[in-house]
Amino acid sequence: MEPHQLSATEAKNQLRKGTLTSQALVESCLERIQQREEFVQAWSYVDWDGALEKARAADQEPSTGPLHGIPVGIKDIIDTADMPTLFGEPEIYKGRQPTKDAPVVERLREAGAIIIGKTAPSGHSIMLPGKTRNPHDPARTPGASSSGSAAAVADQMVPLAVATQTAGSILRPATYCGVVGFKSTKGTVPWVGTRIFSRELDTFGSMGRSVEDATLLMQGMTGDERFTIKPIKQPIRVGVYKTPYFDLADGYVQEHLRTSVHLLEKNGVDVREAPIPSGFDELSELQDVIMAYDLNQEFYEFRRAHEDRLHPELVEYLNKGSKISEKEYKSALAYGEKSRTEFSTLMQDFDVLILPSTISHAPDISTTGTSEFIRIWSFLHAPSINLPTAVSPQGLPLSVQLVGQIGKDQELLSAASWIYQAIDTSSDN
């Protein structure tokens, strides 16, 4: 196995034992990027010389934290003092160089991470197609907007990558590219030094090749040692949530959820259908109300300065936001507060909810897919995680999604690690 093929957890263990150096790991990742970037296009910037220099320095120093010597990709909407940050707008923001790191980048450096480069967001760093291709099939979408982060991890260019989500921008690319994508509870990582889309919804998360990897990156991003996988001491209580969109899912998606439930039951898990409050049927649409309104506000000056360069679909979405009244917006916010209380009550009876991540495997490159099963959790601020547990009849990654109680991120990750092992059938297909 080449070093770039190692998961972050495996690499960390070898670095500790002295059977691997950070220099060898970073060199292997950079070689992989050289070989594959032309086809995958996952990066907006790679720090070829700087990453190697920092890796050599890490090999000469005692461990400085949980990510000591491990390469990490940073989504290119997050400020880095030693690399450009172009917000997914290379023509508009050409030459933009921040003077300091975003706090999340500072924490990663303090944790010992080697920032190898900036992963490419999708078009305008929102839901539009960008340059990145799906590593499993370049004719299919990698999703949006954390497309570069998902594709880089999936193609073994880097073991870990920072991602963000406002609607479905972590879990959708994660499922299409076949990696573990974790969205934290909103506010777990401060949204500072990062492009703003919706102050009510913007959330950080992590991409890795295992739940342990995603957890390790969250520990580095937060400095919180509680982000560790802990043994499950009691039977996990799982609620099945099909959502009002379940019938839109392709047959193989529905069948995989049924198979996953069956495997959990075989492993002694208490699985029941979750009694979702009736008003939750509206949450996906209300999330879109908040996002469209906020995006129009945040992008107002940007649009005035660059409207001739904006994609027509972005302009259309901003127009949609401009037509939403302040009364409608405040009503959606109030509904969100009420729904979060109802969700917390519901989750007293469950440790996690399980549902599909997307309605299908990755569609063709002309679209970035849809997020019916995902955006509700962005609205509720709840933690959620994508587990690539199967392949579709066409051989593309297929996933399930787990959702946890608001603020109970560590508990969700521990449950997800156990559930992943119980239902992963991807190697059998």
Image (tube, helix red, strand yellow):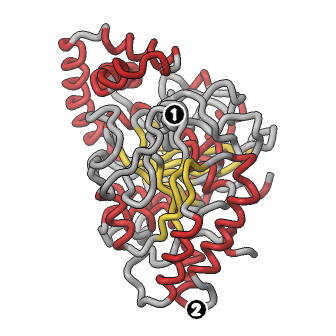
Residue 243 against residue 191 in the figure, above or below: above
Which quadrant of the rendered structure holds the N terminus? bottom right
Other-residue count near label 2 (Cα within 10 Å), few / some / many at <14 / 14–19 / ≥20 = few
Residue 199 against residue 210 in the figure, above or below: above
Q: Which residue is mark 1?
A: 91
Between 108 and 93, the one nearer to me in the picture: 93
Q: Which residue is mark 2?
A: 18
**Amino acid at dot 1:** Glu
Q: Secondary structure at mark 2?
A: loop
Position of residue 367 measured from the top left corner of the image (x, y, whole percent):
63, 25
**What count of labels does the image hold?**
2
Residue at x 52% of width, y 76% of height: 53
**Amino acid at dot 2:** Gly
Q: Is 357 on the left or on the right of 188, as rendered? A: right
Residue at x 45% of width, y 71% of height: 113
2 and 1 marks in contact (CB < 8 Å)? no
